[in-house]
Every structure is written in C-alpha cells, then in structure tokens.
C-alpha cells in the first residue's frame, strides 16, 4: 500500500510574524493538535535546525510515541520534520503571508505504515486526514486568540 499523505490549510487572522511566534514553538501544540498528550523539545522555544522533539499522540485510541528531528528551518516562515524511529513519517508547517495582518498555514504530512498496521491503513488515513484538517483550523483559532493559552 502507498503512503498516507495529507495537506491542510487555514487562513489565520494575524500577521505571519505573530503566527510564527506561536506555531514555531512545539510547546504550544498542546493547545491545538488533536490527540496530543505530551510534547517535549530538547531546548524550549522556537524550533531550530536539528532540534529533537518527543511527542505522544493518540491515534484511534492507541498512544504512539515518536522521536522527531526538525530540519529545513526557514525562520519566520517554515520548517520540516521527520520521525527518527518508529513509524516512517515526515511533514512540514509553512506560513504564507496574505497581507500585513493575515497569513495562510499549510500543514503537510506523509505517513507510511509498516507491518500489521498496514491492515488499518484505510481507517488510519481517514482519521489522520480528519484530525489534520481540524488541527489547521484549531491552530488558526489559537493564533487569533480564540483559544487561550
């Protein structure tokens, strides 16, 4: 079976700079990512090239712990991530300016299931696409101040 791939977008009613300040700090993910139980970055604050992140995410009732490495950091605009062990996954966050006080968030994820998990691919694909779409909108709300930190 092929990989599960999803791209979600949401317009944020805030400047790219304000959005980056919140969305480049993994500690804030707890406020907007569905199923995220725990997230720890080796050095608190905005992401940086080579940052190491450990997250615990519940997908379909199952807790999955992933070790993530950050790369391709474009300060103020984007970064990419990849899982270093466990499930083969990679993705990115990008902010595109839409004027002085608006920007678009683009979340991309590619996930390749292995072993017996491949049998669940249709269900996992549905859950991942739904949660990623919701995450984009929750992130936009969080940045715009609709969700209190």
Image: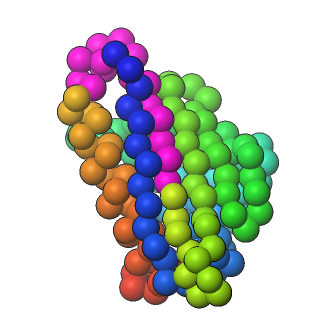
Q: Is residue 42 above or below residue 136?
A: above
Q: How many marks?
A: 0
Examine the image and state in which quarter residue 48 appears.
bottom right
Q: Residue at x 38, y 32 (%)?
A: 4
Q: Position of residue 90 (x, y in %)?
A: 55, 36
Q: Residue at x 46, y 73 (%)?
A: 11
Observer-nearest of 126 and 29: 126
Q: Position of residue 15 (x, y in %)?
A: 62, 82
Q: Is residue 15 above or below residue 53?
A: below
Q: Position of residue 45 (x, y in %)?
A: 70, 65
Q: Position of residue 113 (x, y in %)?
A: 39, 22
* Left or right of residue 146: residue 27: right
Q: Residue at x 68, y 78 (%)?
A: 17
Q: Is residue 120 magenta?
A: yes
Q: Is residue 136 above or below residue 66?
A: below
Q: Is residue 124 above or below residue 39?
A: above
Q: Quadrant of the N terminus?
A: top left
Of all residues, the one furthest to the top in this rendering is 115
Examine the image and state in which quarter residue 76 appears.
bottom right
Tell me if I can see residue 32 in this picture: no
Q: How is the image coloured?
A: rainbow
Examine the image and state in which quarter residue 30 appears.
bottom left
Q: Is residue 32 magenta?
A: no
Q: Residue at x 38, y 20 (%)?
A: 2
* Left or right of residue 48: residue 145: left
Magenta segment: 107-121
Observer-nearest of 10 and 45: 10
Tell me if I can see residue 101 in this picture: yes
């Amino acid at each position: 079976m092929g990989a599960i791939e999803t791209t979600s977008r949401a317009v944020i009613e805030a400047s790219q700079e304000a959005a980056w300040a919140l969305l480049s700090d993994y500690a804030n993910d707890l406020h907007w990512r569905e199923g995220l139980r725990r997230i720890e970055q080796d050095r608190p604050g905005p992401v940086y090239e080579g940052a190491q992140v450990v997250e615990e995410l519940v997908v379909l009732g199952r807790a999955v712990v992933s070790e993530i490495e950050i790369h391709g950091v474009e300060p103020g605009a984007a970064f990419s991530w990849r899982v270093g062990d466990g499930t083969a996954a990679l993705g990115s966050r990008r902010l595109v300016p839409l004027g002085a006080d608006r920007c678009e968030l683009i979340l991309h994820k590619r996930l390749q299931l292995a072993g017996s998990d491949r049998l669940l691919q249709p269900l996992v694909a549905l859950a991942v696409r739904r949660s990623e779409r919701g995450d984009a909108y929750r992130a936009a709300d969080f940045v715009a101040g609709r969700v209190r930190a």
